[in-house]
């Protein structure tokens, strides 16, 4: 592009953007501060802004067995994401490349699966899981997470598949490869970044999920988001501990936003906006 | 490449199968099987439940449309729709307007844009339950940062707190949603703005159009399909709101913030009126099928997406 079209950055607009980001993210920073804030300065009026940081809340969170919930969260998000990638990748490719009978109807079914309010699913799931003894099991929750993540993954990865030039596949087929070999050796390598970024989004969705984990989990399978409201006890709210758990639940998100950027727009609009 | 191809040519049975008409169906079969189990089965089961008496998790007799009749005669059902409507009316237009303004800001010449953009994604990628927690802390009773330093100082809500009054609780929940989703709207609109062709803008500049004219005559019309699609998505999403209400107000005070999801939750797990809540789930589900269809058609036709 020509140099004339790229004027220099404006300090005014930059400052405004920075101010906006600062105001917007201030509550997040305050949550982080709360995790280190001693109990005796927490409820004081006027607000105590400066305090000697304490690790008390971390200790009591660890003592209360929250590391196990953290482990469950990680394992559940990883397992459900791995399944989604395994089952969803060929399907997304097939949807993008082939004329299938009733394709639009299937799409709509998949889209509606993704968009339906979780509570609509939790009610039947709860009764079905009771009957099949899947309540409070790892397998049960992994299955339930497929509902929103598999449909999401197929839908979004399909838009990545459609961005691939079909000519590459044709050349490989002219060279005598089977369609399946073409899928494995030509399509998959080209799709790698799409698969990784969509899978990361699936991981985050599973990680963030609350209602399924709350209703279909229990003493055995408890994730971090479910652990947060548990700190609102009959003896009072454990604010510092809640902040610690909240920050732990936030960590993967803080990492993901820097890797995903454009894919987030594509993902959250179900591929309608390319980002 | 052709030499390699002759060496690795597949055995005939595989070649035959992957050229057959059944091949694409084989690729989607596992995914479809899973979706039938985790989506179609629960839906049909919800329909089944909604047509039966369900006592303490035991499915009883078929009762025609009793559950639906009870639901439609239940004031709390209509109240939940009103709550959802108000919530969307507070949240979505604000998110839309602020998002558009923000997108125009991002479109200016900004230093270090690739640094700001990821930061702006943080709220919309956060777990809604953590968002709720965040604002529970900010707005906590007497000592919350915002309650004490802003709301109390300026005497905005004398004698009450944000979540104690039914007039304010819903608005505050709407504003929490605005906090979470406005940055995303900014970034989505900005992505759309960046994708617009440059030539009309050059032409407009040559013709001496000012920023105002350029926006209303050029940017807005070009962006309209995108705005419609994203706005719709937000409406659909806002209807589902549950997590933040659960942790901030639990539907209260009274039923002032009882969204349909919250109501269904309480009917199922607190009152055990499963037949009725299944009826609610089915109705909501059907509404979503229709909405998704509209979203799909609009996005497909006007955005050339999908």
Image: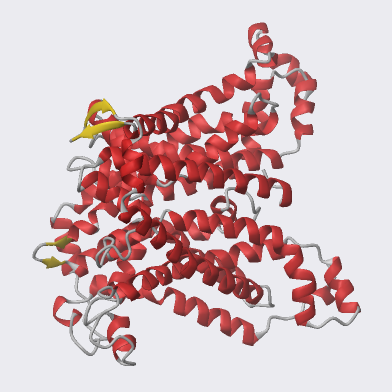
Q: In which quarter of the view is residue B101 placed?
A: bottom right
Identify whether B150 is placed above or below B276: below
Q: Where is residue A100? Give x, y as percent.
A: 66, 25
Q: Residue at x 38, y 45 (%)?
A: A118
* A189 relative to B195 in the view: left or right: left
Question: Coloured how?
Answer: secondary structure
Which one is nearer the viewer's eye here, B304 or B27?
Answer: B304
Q: In which quarter of the view is residue A40 placed?
A: bottom left
Q: Where is residue B112? Give x, y as percent.
A: 61, 74
Q: Is residue A252 visible?
A: yes
* B214 relative to B12 in the view: left or right: right
Which one is nearer the viewer's eye here, B82 or A142?
Answer: B82
Which one is nearer the viewer's eye here, A197 or A214?
Answer: A214
Q: Residue at x 23, y 27 (%)?
A: B60
Name the residue at the bottom extreme: B154
* B4 relative to B58 in the view: left or right: right
* B141 relative to B199 in the view: left or right: left
Quadrant location of the N terminus of chain A in the rendered image:
bottom right
Q: Is residue A199 visible?
A: no
Quadrant location of the C terminus of chain A in the rendered image:
bottom right
Identify whether B237 is placed above or below A206: below
In the rendered picture of this protein, how many numbered marks are placed on residues? 0
Q: Residue at x 57, y 79 (%)?
A: A17
Q: Residue at x 75, y 25 (%)?
A: A172
Q: Where is residue B302? Give x, y as percent.
A: 73, 51
Q: Where is residue B196? Give x, y as percent.
A: 76, 62
């Amino acid at each position: 592009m020509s140099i004339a079209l790229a004027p220099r950055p404006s300090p005014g607009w930059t400052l405004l953007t920075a101010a906006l980001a600062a105001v917007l993210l201030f509550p997040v920073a305050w949550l982080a501060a709360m995790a280190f804030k001693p109990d005796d300065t927490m409820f004081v009026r006027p607000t105590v802004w400066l305090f000697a940081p304490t690790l008390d809340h971390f200790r009591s969170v660890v003592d209360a067995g929250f590391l196990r919930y953290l482990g469950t969260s990680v394992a559940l998000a990883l397992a459900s994401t791995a399944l989604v990638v395994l089952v969803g990748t060929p399907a997304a490719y097939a949807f993008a490349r082939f004329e299938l009978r009733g394709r639009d109807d299937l799409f709509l079914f998949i889209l509606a699966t993704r968009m339906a309010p979780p509570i609509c699913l939790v009610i039947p799931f709860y009764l079905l899981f009771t009957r099949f003894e899947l309540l409070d099991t790892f397998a049960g929750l992994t299955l339930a997470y497929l509902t929103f993540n598999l449909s999401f993954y197929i839908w979004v990865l399909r838009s990545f598949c459609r961005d691939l030039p079909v000519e590459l596949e044709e050349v490989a087929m002219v060279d005598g490869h089977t369609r399946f070999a073409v899928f494995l050796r030509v399509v998959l390598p080209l799709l790698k970044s799409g698969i990784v970024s969509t899978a990361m989004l699936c991981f985050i969705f599973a990680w963030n999920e609350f209602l399924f984990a709350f209703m279909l989990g229990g003493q055995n399978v408890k994730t971090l988001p479910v652990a947060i409201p548990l700190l609102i006890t009959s003896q009072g709210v454990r604010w510092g501990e809640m902040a610690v758990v909240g920050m732990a639940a936030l960590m993967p998100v803080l990492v993901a936003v820097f890797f995903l950027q454009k894919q987030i727009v594509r993902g959250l609009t179900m591929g309608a906006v390319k980002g | 490449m052709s030499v390699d191809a002759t060496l690795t040519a597949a055995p005939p049975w595989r070649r035959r199968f992957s050229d057959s008409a059944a091949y694409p169906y084989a690729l989607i079969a596992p995914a479809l099987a899973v979706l039938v189990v985790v989506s179609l089965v629960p839906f049909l089961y919800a329909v089944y439940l909604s047509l039966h008496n369900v006592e303490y998790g035991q499915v009883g007799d078929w009762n025609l449309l009793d559950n639906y009749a009870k639901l439609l005669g239940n004031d709390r059902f209509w109240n939940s729709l009103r709550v959802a409507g108000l919530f969307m009316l507070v949240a979505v237009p604000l998110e839309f307007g602020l998002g558009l303004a923000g997108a125009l800001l991002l479109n200016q010449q900004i230093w270090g844009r690739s640094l700001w953009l990821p930061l702006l994604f943080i709220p919309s990628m956060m777990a809604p339950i953590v968002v709720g927690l965040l604002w529970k802390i900010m707005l906590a009773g007497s000592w919350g940062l915002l309650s004490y330093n802003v709301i109390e100082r300026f005497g905005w809500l004398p004698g009450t707190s944000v979540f104690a009054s039914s007039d304010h609780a819903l608005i505050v929940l709407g504003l929490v949603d605005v906090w979470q989703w406005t940055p995303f709207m900014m970034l989505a609109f900005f992505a759309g703005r960046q994708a617009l062709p440059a030539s009309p803008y050059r032409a407009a500049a040559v013709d001496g159009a000012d920023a105002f004219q350029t926006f209303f005559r050029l940017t807005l019309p070009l962006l309209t399909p995108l705005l419609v699609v994203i706005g719709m998505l937000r409406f659909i999403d806002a209807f589902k709101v549950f997590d933040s209400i659960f942790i901030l107000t639990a539907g209260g005070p009274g039923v002032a913030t009882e969204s349909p999801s919250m109501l269904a939750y309480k009917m199922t797990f607190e009152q055990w009126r499963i037949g009725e809540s299944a009826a609610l789930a089915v109705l909501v589900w059907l509404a979503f099928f229709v909405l998704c269809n509209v979203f799909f058609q609009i996005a497909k036709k006007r955005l050339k997406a999908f």
